[in-house]
Amino acid sequence: MNKNYIEIQINVQGKQAYANDIIVAYLSEIGFDSFTEANRIVSCYIQETKFDEVQFNDTIELITAILGECEFEKKIIPYTNWNKEWESHFQPVFVDSFCVVRAPFHDSFEGFDYSVTIEPKMSFGTGHHETTYLILQYLSQLDLVGKTVADCGCGTGVLGILASMCGARSVFAFDNDEICYENTIENAKLNTVNNITVSHGDVSVLCDTYDIMLANINRNVLTTHMKKIAKSLKSGGLLIMSGFYEKDIAIISEQALLNKLKFVYFNTKNNWTITVFSKE
């Protein structure tokens, strides 16, 4: 299987402060799954087998219509070089005193309730992005002891792993990206978490009901599959969603309410948002 990635580096110097958010939002829609930023250069990554040149060019046109012309460079990075790529960018993530997310090559940190070690392998969900951070932060408010949890679109598995550490009875994690599927299994072992079942697939693999559902997925996937997701939530359970902008809350809420879910909470960070709904 070809696991090479394509890297697109987009120069946003002189652009609006939120330029990187625009780029992430649009490229996420066409399969780009990981992003880093340094010195106003946004590096965007997609598996080579998923890259569509025509679709990419169309998306760049949409981005430039908002931001103006953006210079970019494209190159192929062999899969074997991913660790080096991430080690050059990956910094620990600190979520208040609740948890730290770090890579195996980082030193350990004191003063946190939980420490999650993640070998990224280009999977989304290292805690750096606002959407992952917001869910990690919200988990600190919950009593997860004895709860069943589904981690939908698990990426690195960081959310499900932390839920397990917080006392969840069991975690079901799934992702339609094979690399994410493999990465979650690897990271669960790395953190000696043994009550996570990992599946390769989309929301159709949900075949049970859960007390807590974590869904850090883009808006279109959430709205398209809201009925299935809501059906998989136990009565009294919580659906915790992120992966979209604050302006999209109304669209997400409409679908949630149509599926008899009740609004509980929302928060934002740099225009990205988390929304929480309950099932009566």
Image (cartoon, rainbow, N blue to C red):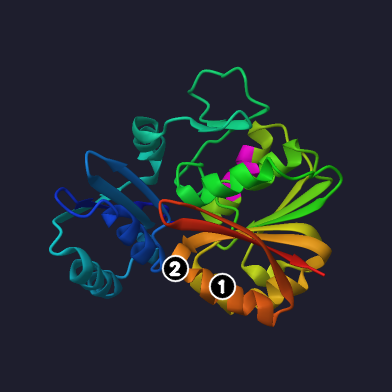
Number of marks drawn:
2
Is residue 166 visible in the rendered image? The answer is: yes
Circle 1 crowding by C-alpha within 10 Å: few under 14, some 14–19, many from 20: some
Q: Position of residue 70 (x, y in %)?
A: 15, 59
State the SS at label 2: helix
Vertical relation: 160 (above or below) 252: above
- Magenta span: 182-187
Evaluate if marks 1 and 2 touch, with contact meaning CB atoms under 8 Å apart: no
Query: Label 2 belongs to which residue?
Result: 247
Q: Is residue 47 left or right of residue 11?
A: right
Q: Please report the residue visible at 68 percent of the width from the left and 47 percent of the height from the top.
A: 160
151 above or below 49? above
Q: Residue at x 74, y 45 (%)?
A: 142
The picture quadrant where one finds residue 217 is: bottom right
Q: Earlier in the sequence, mark 1 or mark 2?
A: 2
Q: Residue at x 27, y 49 (%)?
A: 42
Which residue is labeled 1 in the image? 252
Q: Does the rendering let one see residue 209? A: no
Q: Magenta segment: does it hold 207?
A: no
CA gap between label 1 and label 2 equals: 10 Å
Residue 207 locus on image (x, y percent): 78, 69
Disc 1 marks which amino acid? Ile
Residue at 18% x, 54% y: name it: 15
Q: Is residue 276 left or right of residue 267?
A: right
As drawn, the label of residue 107 is none
Majority SS type along the magenta span: helix
Q: Which three-letter amino acid code belongs to the residue tagged 2?
A: Lys
Residue 81 as seen in the image, left or right of residue 155? left
Disc 1, SS: helix
Q: Residue furthest bottom?
A: 258
Which of the pair 265/208 is nearer the observer?
Answer: 265
